[in-house]
Amino acid sequence: IEEEWGVLMFFMNKKGEGKGNRSEQLIICGAKRARRGAELKVMSGVEAKNPGFFTRGVREKTSSEKGFDTDRLLFKDDELSYSLGKQGTTRKKLEGAAGAILEYVGHVAFIAGTLKERRRCREFLSWLLAQRRGSVTI
């Protein structure tokens, strides 16, 4: 993850917390976009091992922030597998074409980037999912 996103990551405890504490904080150092990409990748891994850890009670969110922010989309099982693709290839293609960060955390798609990048990613996702039901006209 560190090499993929160009960040430095390490675990640390707060001062005064001993080793008896079962959880530690993950510190991610780097540029904002890279930190968010690494964070979402970690969240995806944790969610795979412990379903609901990050997604329990999460709702869809669309931000109107022009700058860097994150949107959330909830997916059904079939939508998730289709938009992920074999070994994540479809997700990577969508992410690259839109210029946004696209990561699936459980059944939630997190789309991070500028407003234009997030909108473009949502549009590409909608085209992809519409394609499953028939031809798409743009």
Image (cartoon, rainbow, N blue to C red):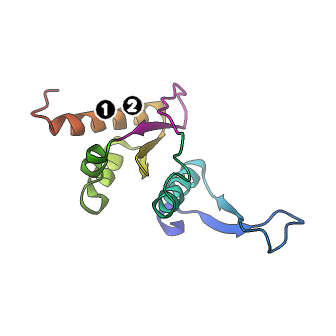
Q: Where residue 35 sits in the image (x, y, percent)?
A: 58, 54
**CB atoms at circles 1 and 2 under 8 Å apart?**
yes
Q: Quadrant of residue 126?
A: top left
Residue for point 75% across, 67% down: 12
Q: Which mark is residue 41?
A: none
Q: Where residue 72 sits in the image (x, y, percent)?
A: 46, 37
- Secondary structure under tag 2 reads helix
Q: Residue at label 1?
A: 123
- Name above or below for residue 87 compared with residue 37: below
Q: State the quadrant of the C terminus.
A: top left
Query: What residue span does the magenta drawing correspond to?
Result: 58-75
Please tell me whether the stretch drawn in magenta is mainly helix, strand or loop.
loop
Q: Where residue 32 sits in the image (x, y, percent)?
A: 60, 48
- Image-based side of 54 in relation to 120, left or right: right
- What's the amino acid at mark 2? Arg
The single residue placed furthest to the left in the displayed view is: 135
Residue for point 23% across, 38% down: 129
- Name above or below for residue 119 compared with residue 9: above
Q: Give 19 or 33, whichever is nearer the viewer.
A: 19
- Image-based side of 5 in relation to 100, left or right: right
Q: Which mark is residue 119?
A: 2
